[in-house]
Image (tube, rainbow, N blue to C red):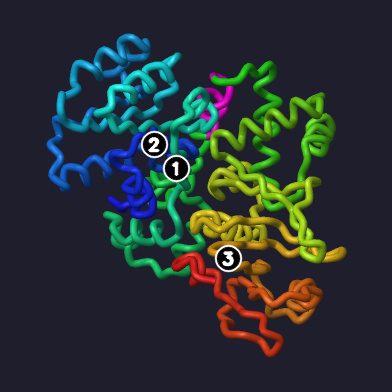
Amino acid sequence: MIGRIQYLKELARYIDKRVIKVVTGIRGCGKTTVLEQFQKALIQKGINDSRIIFVRLDESAFAKLLDPKSLEGYIVEKLQDGVMNYIFIDDVYRCTGFQKVILSLLAKGNTDIYIAGSNRTALTEGLADCQVIPMLPFSFAEYIEAQKQSMLKAVAEQSTEQHFMDFARFGNIPFTLQLFKNSRNINQYLQGLYNTIIVQDIASIHPIKEIKVLDAAMSYMLTHTGISCSSKKLADTLTEQGFKTTQPTAENYLQFMEECGLIYRVGRYDIKEKEQLKSLPMFYAVDMGLSNMLTNKPEMGPILKNLVFLELKRQQYSISAGKIGNNTIDFVASKGGQTWYIQVEAFAKDTKVLNKKLRPFRQIRDYYPRVLITLDKTTGTSESGIRFCNALEFLLNGQL
């Protein structure tokens, strides 16, 4: 089992603090596993497991606790006086009115509460004292580490390059690794996951009149990663496909997809004017496996760009899409007072491709680092100060 160290450290920052820890992320990204790993860490610190209460509302064994009174009664009965009690509730929003239960438990003073689920809005609505911990599926480094533990020797001994091609093709949802790179089984699992997201993470929370329209919107956004889009553009596209849709409905669908961690909205930034732009944000998918499942001819360029975005997000960079004159910079990434300008191209050995990708860099008048990330083996810094970074190295260590 792969230790999700980044998220365990984040949870540890808030241990015993009077705040509700909210772990959220796309269905299947490993939230339950992280809760289990954190419980083991508590026990290793000397906390008796009798002080740890774990309720999984997605399991039939806890079906009776979907009623808020039953849920609170079950937990209160297990609380120990005079010591801190650690409460973990997975898929908490399956219990209608869970907020009152959580706030009541928090008011007791000797409870440290952790809740998890796939829809961020449903989890946090009505809870003021909460700390959201967003989760992503496996990073490339975690993916390789998990593959090295594979029961199939042929999988475990693959090269980094081979693992990357499978990572780019099948995505980074942890359970897919247990399917041993069987494309048919992986696609079946991802299709089921996709359908479950529609039904349980969106339609069960928001009133959806036409599931087919939502399905079409999700499919479009997942298969057009890294493009600028607006609610009007999405509504027009759906209407052209035969799904007459209004702009407000399209905006709702975009927000619903963001709530359950399926897509991410990235604002645009005018580098010359040093200001955020409100028009035409960019959108990226949380998993390339889901994206590739829905398209017949996935292309490495958009896939690599999406994977770089996910790693930047995982490394907690603040990310914008850059605009400089009539040209664009894929990512303006900032962290710790430093900013990087980043271009991504699958392969840039061709002189025309390279010059086209570097041209926007030459229009920038400040001195922040400029980085071109490609799958080429070329590394180092050019005479004009542009750094060439191998994509696999970046995805493994997160260093620009």
Within-10-Å neighbours for mark 3: few <14, some 14–19, many 20+: few
**Residue 231 painted magenta:** no
Q: Nearer the viewer, residue 13 or 88?
A: 13
Q: Which amino acid, by three-letter code, is at mark 2?
A: Lys
- Of residue 150 and residue 82, the one placed in the foreground of this image is 82
Q: Position of residue 172 (x, y in %)?
A: 47, 50
Which comes sooner in the sequence, label 1 or label 2? 2
Horizontal side of 224 relative to 166 (left or right) equals right
| Element assignment for label 3 | loop
Q: Is tag 2's residue or tag 3's residue first in the polypeptide sequence? A: 2
What residue type is disc 1 on?
Ile
Q: Tell me the magenta residue range.
A: 194-204
Residue placed most toward the observer, 121 or 105: 105
Tag 2–tag 3 contact (CB < 8 Å):
no
In this orientation, does residue 189 appear? no
Residue 202 inside the magenta-drawn segment = yes
- Residue of label 1: 133
Which residue position is annotated with label 3?
A: 337
Position of 356 with respect to 76 (left or right) is right
Check disc 2 and report the residue beneath it. 21
Magenta-colored segment: predominant secondary structure: helix
Dots 1 and 3: beta carbons under 8 Å? Answer: no
Residue at screen point 38% across, 39% down: 31
Q: Quadrant of residue 11?
A: top left
Residue 73's place in the image compared with 236, above or below, is above
Residue 293 is left or right of residue 226, and the answer is left
